[in-house]
Image (cartoon, grey):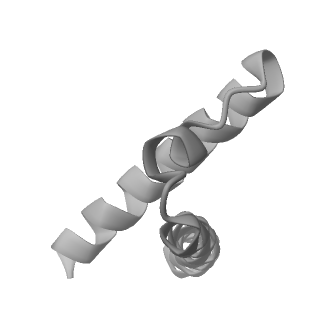
Amino acid sequence: MSGLRTVSKWLVILGAVNWGLVALLKYDLFMNLFGKWPGLVQVVYLLVGVAGVWGLYAMLTNGSKKRK
């Protein structure tokens, strides 16, 4: 399970860096890396989104367990 957590954390970090690059430089890292395969770009964005939602859920549930 820790391997999945590590992958999820890296996906969230890469997603955040990508959005920062889009905002600052109008440079989409994922599109430039995988642009020849639009389906793969969509899968990467989906994985980043799922990792973000899972991370949010993990933060909220771990935080409530610590308070008890």
The image quarter containing residue 39 is bottom right
Residue 36 place in picture, x, y as percent: 49, 55
Residue at 39% x, 66% y: name it: 8
Relative to 22, does residue 62 appear above or below in the rendering?
below
Residue 13 place in picture, x, y as percent: 49, 44
Does residue 29 appear left or right of residue 1 in this picture?
Answer: right
* Front-lying residue, 18 or 31: 31
Residue at 60% x, 75% y: name it: 46
Relative to 23, does residue 10 appear above or below in the rendering?
below
Residue at 78% x, 25% y: name it: 26
Q: Quadrant of the N terminus?
A: bottom left
* Front-lying residue, 25 or 13: 25
Residue 7 place in picture, x, y as percent: 30, 63
The image quarter containing residue 49 is bottom right
Q: Residue furthest top?
A: 25
Residue 68 place in picture, x, y as percent: 56, 81
Q: How many marks?
A: 0
Residue at 49% x, 64% y: name it: 37
Relative to 53, does residue 28 appear above or below in the rendering?
above
Does residue 24 appear left or right of residue 49 in this picture?
Answer: right
